[in-house]
């Protein structure tokens, strides 16, 4: 089911629409006025899409660009090995734990306002990170970056689905949005290596300043002026505290698994407490007069199924995004910039598929079929990586894998459309925040589980007398095999839970009824 038209909810309608023109008799208007207004509205929507995609690209780039510069940051600021992990963890904990809250606050206070404030916070925090001279200051700046990222990215999809209401137009917009996420990580690895080698690690943060300021300058006049529902429609302070504390503690538990182990008292204790807090949040939402997260959103098979598929898919694809880069550097001896360039074909083919043909395939065959096809291709990617040799040749052993990454360009736009398909106009920010939250949880689980398995297998092989290259490759093989299992599970969920959507005319009585 497609999301309801933004026109049915005054608070989310684009500012470029003209209420006076809509009420004037046809005969009282010049023939060219409608065409001019329509063209201006179309331009405004395209600019809005460009702004949101640019903001998301900046955030995605930041996630991968930092990993390349970590050795330089450690050497310059004197981080301990354990302390260095908090350059990533501080960002991930703030980002992942606040997405759901930020998405709902966007519905209540205005999604455009939330996007603008989040982008401004992220840009200011990037400046603070770039001038950091101590580990504590950099970690604090990264936490602040995570807050800004959550505010901006939680509402991005919500703005898009209320701006682009026609199915084909919306499919193209989501394809652009999905491409920024799919390709941003690979671009970040290249850019991070180049900036760190040519200038210094400080510039991986300074690069965000012109991008963020330009996005804000264009966003102010083109994004819709939505006022939101008001805090009274969902001012559940207790629920907000429960879900934020539960997600923050849960993500902290996952990112510390590699240090403490899965069965340690620390992991079990904090994990059970996080589950208790999230359980209390769900119970609270079932009884609260104005719930922060109306539970009706989880009754949708499309929303619940798409979020579960995404969690499994993102957890699996961590092994492609991160472990392949580690394999290239630690086993094949590639440098940072060369590693990024080696992974560029994946970004190029993902972009070509997601921007070029995914919208047409979704319109012709339906999102469910396209998603299943993409998952099959991605399963092939990890299956091939599970057999990559110690002394691999890029053209024969790795380039075919990069090209099969086209499956991500098929799967992500289809999955995003399904995840937002049943969102009501007044829940679009919440649905967007939920979709982004499961993405971050999936990433954290992938990092914790697959990296721990790879390290454990590597240590075992080293103890058996294997060379370092053989041991590392064996560890990565195990992670790729487990990631393949995640993708098989994602395919099973998509096949059994997600149903093919029945075409419905935009603005149908059913859609208008649900939008109220």
Image (cartoon, grey):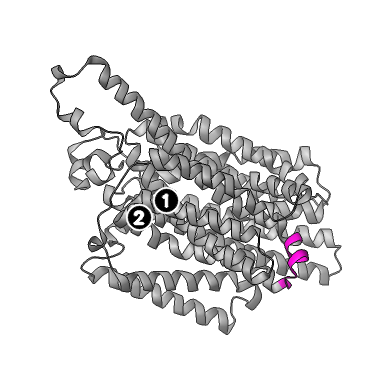
Badge 2 marks a residue whose secondary structure is: helix
Numbered range of the magenta stretch: 72-81
Checking the image for residue 115, the label placed there is 1
Question: Residue at (72%, 67%) from the top-left corner?
Answer: 455
Vertical placement of residue 325 versus 372, above or below: below
Residue 336, image x, y percentages:
76, 50
- Judge from the rendering whether residue 125 lies leftward or rightward of residue 44; answer left or right: right
Other residues around mark 2 within 10 Å, as few (<14) / some (14–19) / many (≥20):
many
Q: Could you tell me if the residues under marks 1 and 2 are in contact, i.e. CB atoms within 8 Å?
A: yes
Mark 1 or mark 2: which comes first in sequence? 2
Checking the image for residue 106, the label placed there is 2
Seen from the viewer's position, the closer of residues 307 and 475 is 307
Q: Quadrant of the N terminus?
A: top left
Badge 1 marks a residue whose secondary structure is: helix
- Judge from the rendering whether residue 371 lies leftward or rightward of residue 400; answer left or right: left
Residue 428, image x, y percentages:
33, 50
Question: Residue at (44%, 34%) from the top-left corner?
Answer: 47
Question: Residue at (56%, 44%) from the top-left corner?
Answer: 211
Seen from the viewer's position, the closer of residues 372 and 441 is 441
Residue 125, image x, y percentages:
55, 59
Residue 74, located in which quarter of the rendered image?
bottom right
């Amino acid at each position: 089911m497609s999301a309801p038209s933004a026109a049915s909810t005054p608070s989310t309608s684009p500012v470029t629409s003209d209420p006076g023109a809509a009420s004037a008799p046809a005969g009282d208007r010049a023939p060219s006025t409608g065409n001019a207004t329509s063209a201006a509205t179309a331009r405004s929507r395209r600019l809005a899409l460009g702004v949101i995609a640019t903001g998301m690209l900046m955030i995605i780039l930041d996630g991968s660009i930092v990993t390349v510069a970590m050795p330089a940051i450690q050497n310059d600021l004197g981080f301990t090995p354990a302390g260095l992990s908090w350059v990533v963890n501080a960002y991930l904990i703030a980002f992942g734990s606040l997405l759901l809250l930020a998405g709902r606050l966007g519905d209540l206070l205005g999604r455009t306002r939330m996007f603008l404030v989040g982008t401004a916070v992220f840009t200011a925090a990037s400046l603070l990170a770039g001038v950091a001279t101590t580990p504590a200051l950099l970690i604090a700046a990264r936490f602040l970056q995570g807050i800004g990222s959550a505010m901006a990215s939680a509402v991005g999809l919500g703005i898009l689905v209320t701006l682009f209401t026609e199915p084909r137009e919306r499919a193209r917009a989501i394809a652009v949005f999905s491409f920024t996420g799919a390709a941003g990580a690979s671009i970040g690895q290249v850019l991070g290596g180049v900036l760190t080698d040519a200038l210094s690690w400080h510039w991986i943060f300074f690069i965000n300043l012109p991008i963020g300021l330009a996005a804000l300058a264009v966003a102010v006049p083109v994004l819709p002026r939505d006022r939101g529902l008001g805090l009274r429609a969902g001012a559940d302070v207790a629920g907000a505290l429960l879900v934020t504390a539960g997600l923050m503690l849960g993500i902290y538990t996952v990112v510390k698994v590699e240090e403490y182990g899965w069965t340690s008292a620390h992991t079990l204790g904090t994990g059970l407490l996080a589950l208790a807090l999230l359980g209390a949040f769900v119970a609270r939402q079932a009884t609260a007069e104005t719930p922060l997260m109306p539970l009706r959103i989880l009754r949708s098979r499309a929303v619940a199924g798409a979020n579960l598929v995404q969690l499994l898919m993102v957890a699996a694809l961590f092994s492609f995004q991160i472990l392949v880069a580690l394999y290239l550097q630690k086993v094949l001896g590639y440098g940072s910039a060369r590693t990024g360039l080696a992974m560029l074909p994946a970004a190029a083919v993902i972009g070509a598929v997601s921007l070029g043909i995914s919208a047409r395939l979704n319109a012709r065959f339906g999102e469910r079929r396209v998603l299943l096809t993409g998952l099959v291709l991605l399963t092939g990617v990890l299956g091939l990586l599970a057999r990559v040799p110690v002394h691999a040749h890029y053209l024969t052993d790795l380039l075919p894998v990069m090209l099969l990454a086209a499956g991500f360009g098929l799967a992500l736009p289809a999955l995003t459309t399904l995840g937002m398909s049943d969102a009501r106009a007044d829940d679009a920010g919440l649905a967007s925040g939920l979709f982004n939250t499961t993405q971050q949880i999936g990433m954290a689980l992938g990092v914790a589980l697959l990296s721990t398995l790879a390290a454990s297998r590597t240590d075992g092989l080293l103890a058996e007398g294997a060379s370092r290259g053989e041991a590392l490759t064996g560890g990565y093989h195990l992670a790729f095999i487990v990631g393949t299992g995640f993708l098989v599970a994602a395919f099973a969920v998509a096949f059994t839970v997600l149903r093919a959507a029945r075409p419905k005319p935009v603005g149908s009585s059913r859609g208008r009824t649900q939008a109220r």
